[in-house]
Image: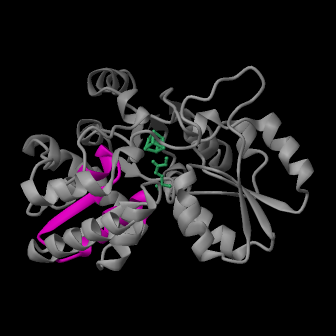
Amino acid sequence: PEQKLVIKAKIAEKLKEQDAVLIAHYYVDRDLQELAEATGGYVSDSLDMARFGHEHPAKTLIVAGVRFMGETAKILNPEKRVLMPTLEAECSLDLECPAASFYQFCDQHPERTVVVYSNTSAAVKARADYVVTSSIAVELISWLDEQGKKILWAPDRHLGRYIQQVTGADMLLWQGACIVHDEFKHLALAELKEKYPEAGVLVHPESPEKVIQLADAVGSTTQLIKAAQTLPHPRFIVATDSGIFYKMQQAAPDKEFIAAPTMGEGATCKSCAHCPWMAMNGLHNLLQVLETGKNEIFVEEAIRVKALRSTQRMLDFAK
Ligand code: 13P
Ligand code: SF4
């Protein structure tokens, strides 16, 4: 613990020296979340991370999360230096939606408005009409639906189907999934609910349909934390990455939180409710990046300019 304090103090000093601000996702290590808050940075969901980085005057943004979050920061802020503790933190949704095949899919359906989840590469965003995060996806697609638009959605099939069910929009879905949320099991969750009948169920919409059906609240990470504060239940079963417990418990200190089950009968748990890529972010690689300037995010300018259109629309819609 003493060593941790020393590293944290060094990081805080470097952040100041370099006019840098730390922006972290709820799923990263709690030391990083603590440090972000203690140094004037921010911890949030992917939409608010993008917003905060865009509005903050710092010359350098340090994004603790996964690659698409760093790329989004660079797309929106080309004049700023964007660094990440690791460049190897991927996202299964991004990996399962390679730009070349996505472009082909779009070419086959030119009449559709292309809406992509922010969990995608800059090249995929460059082909999209709109980028959304889970916090505004339902609202944005229902607004497009009211205008009679047909949607092509990528890459998360669970989130896509959920939006389709809520809005009734005509949506063609790419078939990607998040390896973490795809692991939640509805039968075991229903059993747990029976054991704790007074518990509310909080579910991130990247989870399978039958898990979402058991939810009392469905939403982005920030929306789930708000639900934990506002819903009357004394206890919650939470179907999202376990990194969220740190902030959730802080936000609702009198409530009790239980992790939703990830292992159904006969199933094997690959990611156990914790994103292996988010877990690559740590104090050591953060300090190293600040000392060396390594791990800078670059986005090819021709792609960035196109991706900015769809990403800026996300921020404008979210206002
Ligand atoms: P949020 O936008 O809800 O933070 O989700 C990001 C993510 O990667 C969830 O797995
Ligand atoms: Fe991607 Fe899932 Fe990890 Fe979120 S939790 S970054 S969606 S792999």
> At which x and y percent is residue 26?
46, 60
> Tag count in the figure?
0
**In this rendering, position of residue 39 left or right of residue 277:** left
Residue 206: x %, y % from top left: 57, 42
Residue depicted at x 63% and y 49%: 167
Query: Would you place residue 298 above or below residue 272 in this image?
Result: below
Residue 309 visible within the image? no
Residue drawn 60% across and 34% down? 182
Q: How is the image coloured?
A: one colour
Quadrant position of residue 261 = top right
Q: Is residue 52 magenta?
A: yes
* Residue 32 x/y as whole percent: 36, 63
Residue 54 drawn at (x, y percent): 24, 68
Q: Which residues are magenta?
A: 44-70
Q: Assign the C terminus to one quadrant of the image.
A: bottom left
Residue 69: in sight, yes or no?
A: yes
Give me the residue at 34% from left, 37% from top.
90
Viewer-proximal residue among 229 and 267? 267
Does 316 sit above or below residue 238? below
Corner quadrant of residue 44? bottom left
Relative to 79, say whether 130 is above or below. Answer: above
Looking at the rendered image, the quarter that the N terminus falls into is bottom left
Question: Is residue 13 covered in magenta?
Answer: no
Residue 35 appears left or right of 182: left
